[in-house]
Structures are given as structure tokens and as C-alpha cells.
Image (spheres, rainbow, N blue to C red):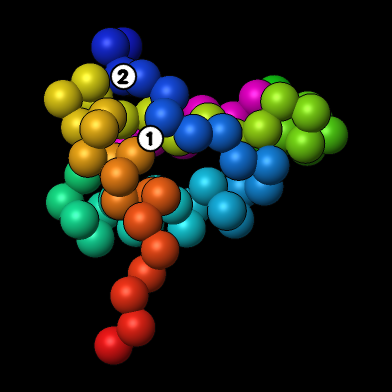
Amino acid sequence: MEGYLVIATYSTEIDAELAQATLAAAGIESFLKYEDSGHMMPVLQQAEGVKLLVAPEFVEEARAILTTPPSEV
């Protein structure tokens, strides 16, 4: 994950995974970074959040995808 940048921090693992799935659907690879000591201390996740990381060349596109409200079909 060296060289990847944090584009968002989520308070729950579920929210982070939903954002990651949204990026995956758009073809953008991303990674989640947990601050919970390998799931042994979930309270740290609440304090530090779950970080969503992408490659530098996808930062702008990923942020735009995550901040654009879904359109009604």
C-alpha cells in the first residue's frame, strides 16, 4: 500500500466497505486500513476510524464518485 493516499475516513467498517465496493464498481482499486490491532481492539476502530486508500492517479475520480449522490433510475 506504499504510495496510496487516504481519501476518506469512516467511523464504521461497514461504511468503509460500502465505499470500497462503490469504487470497485467504477473500476478503482482501493484498500482499507484499520486501526484496531488486527480486530483485537475494535474500540480503536471507533476512535481512529477506517481509512480508505487509493492510488494517487485515482484520488480526484474516487472523491468525485464518493461525493456524488446516487441518481434515481
- Percent coordinates x, y for residue 68 in the rendering: 36, 56
Residue 65 against residue 31 in the figure, above or below: below
Task: Give the residue pinned by disc 1.
Answer: 31
Decide if residue 54 is in sight here: yes
Q: Residue at x 25, y 32 (%)?
A: 60
Residue 8 against residue 24 in the figure, above or below: above
Of 73 and 56, the residue lying toward us: 73
Quarter of image, res 53: top left
**Span shown in magenta:** 29-36
Quarter of image, res 37: top right
Q: Secondary structure at mark 1?
A: strand
The amino acid type, in three-letter code, at marker 1 is Phe
Residue 26 lies left or right of residue 63; in this view the side is: left
Q: Main secondary structure of the magenta part?
A: strand
Task: Give the residue pinned by disc 2.
Answer: 4
Residue 72 against residue 18 in the figure, above or below: below
Quarter of image, res 11: top right
Q: Secondary structure at mark 2?
A: loop
Residue 34, magenta (yes or no): yes
Q: Residue at x 66, y 33 (%)?
A: 49
Name the quarter where the C terminus is drawn.
Answer: bottom left
Residue 69, magenta (yes or no): no
Decide if residue 36 is in sight here: no
Mark 1 touches mark 2? (CB < 8 Å):
yes
Residue 10 lies left or right of residue 67; in this view the side is: right
Residue 1 against residue 36 in the figure, above or below: above
The amino acid type, in three-letter code, at marker 2 is Tyr
For disc 2, the neighbor class at 10 Å (few under 14, some 14 to 19, many from 20) is some
